[in-house]
Image (cartoon, grey):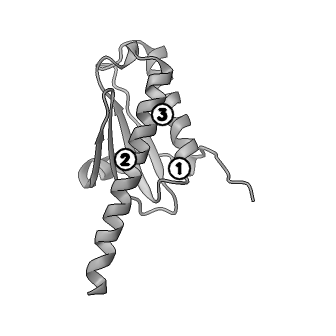
Amino acid sequence: MMTLYSFSTEVRLRCAADYQGVFDGALFKVHQPHFLFLAKPSEQLQSRLGVIVAKKKVRRAHERNRIKRLARESFRLHQQQLGLLDIVVMPKIGIEAVSNADLHQQLEFAWQKLQRQAKKYQKVAVSPSLH
């Protein structure tokens, strides 16, 4: 069976309450040179992504769109390995000067780190009930 790599509305954080839930309940935080990732276990049936690119951090619209496109594309390819997480991605100042290849590399590292943190959390959350 072929794995479906789509980015439908079910895998997006869509409303302010979804984003606020991640900000308030973020259990995982990953810093990269040009990104900040916040995540929490999802109450949905799949991982969801929200990308926030503030005009204050990235002035030009085409750069904001490029960053969002790269983050969505990278998430789309890695969502199967992430488990059930709600994730918010925010760029840091200076990101517009970074090449797509470097951003892909940072996103790749961040997904791996989030995956490790989520697995560690699941082990801790499950193990107390075993004693």
Mark 1 vs mark 3, CA separation in Å = 12 Å
Q: Which residue is mark 2?
A: 113
Look at the image and tell me in which quarter the N terminus lies: bottom right
| Quadrant of residue 85 within the rendered picture | bottom left
Q: Earlier in the sequence, mark 3 or mark 2?
A: 3
Q: Residue 12: percent from the left, percent from the top?
A: 50, 46
Contact (CB < 8 A) between labels 3 and 2? no
Report the amino acid beneath label 3: Ala
Placement of 95 over or under 110, stated as above or below: above
Q: Earlier in the sequence, mark 1 or mark 2?
A: 1
Q: Earlier in the sequence, mark 1 or mark 3?
A: 3
Placement of 105 over or under 131, stated as above or below: above
Q: Which residue shows up at 41% across the image and 39% down it? A: 109
Between residue 4 and residue 65, name the one nearer to us. Answer: 4
Q: Nearer the viewer, mark 1 or mark 2?
A: 2
Q: Which residue is mark 1?
A: 79
Look at the image and tell me in which quarter the C terminus lies: bottom left
Q: Which residue shows up at 46% across the image and 17% down it? A: 99
Contact (CB < 8 A) between labels 1 and 3? no
Mark 1 vs mark 2, CA separation in Å = 13 Å
Left/right placement of residue 6 relative to residue 71 reads right
Left/right placement of residue 109 relative to residue 33 reads right
| Quadrant of residue 125 within the rendered picture | bottom left
